[in-house]
Amino acid sequence: MTSQHDIANLFDHTRFIELREAVLDLFDRQAPDADIAAQLGELLQHIQQQFAREERAMETAQFPPSAAHKRDHDRALADFSERIAQWRQEGDMANLLDYIEAGLADWFVRHVNTRDYITARHLAMK
């Protein structure tokens, strides 16, 4: 059985929230694009690493719906990466900001309360 501590650490999304808030703060302060780009890169890298950890745990536990969970991760990464690319190419800050404030936040809450919750329960029984 996976320890409750390991599961809690695996699904601790505090750092995601901190990094997301840091990006929003830079937008609020109208920071230089280079600063925003660096913070976006850090957030994106964190998300990629978090998803990889979750996916390894699901694979190890032979979690049956892991493919659906991974597809959810892949869609979120693709959406976020696309918004960042649009911002870099077109300077569409409003679209990126709207996505980070609403789209990404809504996805995150829904994902944590469904996919991550179910996965954590499964891992706790292993």
Image (cartoon, rainbow, N blue to C red):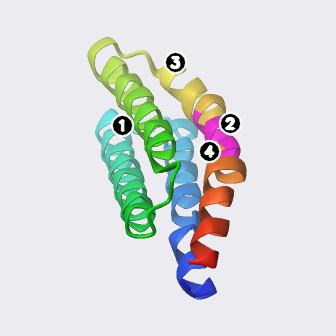
Q: Is residue 15 above or below residue 73?
A: below
The x and y percentages for residue 108 are: 62, 44
Callout 4 amino acid: Phe
Other residues around mark 2 within 10 Å, as few (<14) / some (14–19) / many (≥20)? few
Dot placed on the residue nearer the N-terminal end, 2 or 3: 3
Residue 97 % position (x, y): 54, 28
Select label 1 or label 3 by which is in front. Answer: 3
Q: Give residue 119's quadrant in the image.
A: bottom right
Query: Which of the image's four quarters has the C terminus?
Result: bottom right
Q: Secondary structure at mark 4?
A: helix
Residue on which the image places disc 1: 32
Q: CA distance from mark 1 to mark 3?
A: 17 Å
Asked whether, in this view, residue 75 is left or right of residue 91, the answer is right
* Mark 2 to mark 4 CA distance (whole Å): 5 Å
Start-end of magenta stretch: 104-110
Q: Which residue is mark 4?
A: 108
Report helix, strand or loop for mark 1.
loop
> Along the line of sight, which residue is nearer the eye, 98 or 52?
52
* Type of the residue with mark 1: Pro
Direction from residue 19 to residue 33 in the image, left or right: left
Mark seen at residue 66:
none
Judged left or right of residue 35, residue 96 is right
Report the amino acid beneath label 2: Asp
Picture coordinates of residue 112, whole percent (x, y): 65, 52
Residue 84 falls inside the magenta stretch = no
Q: Nearer the viewer, residue 91 or 50?
A: 50
Residue placed under numbered mark 2 in the picture: 106
Give the residue at x 59% y 66%.
Answer: 14
Mark pair 3, 4: CA separation: 18 Å
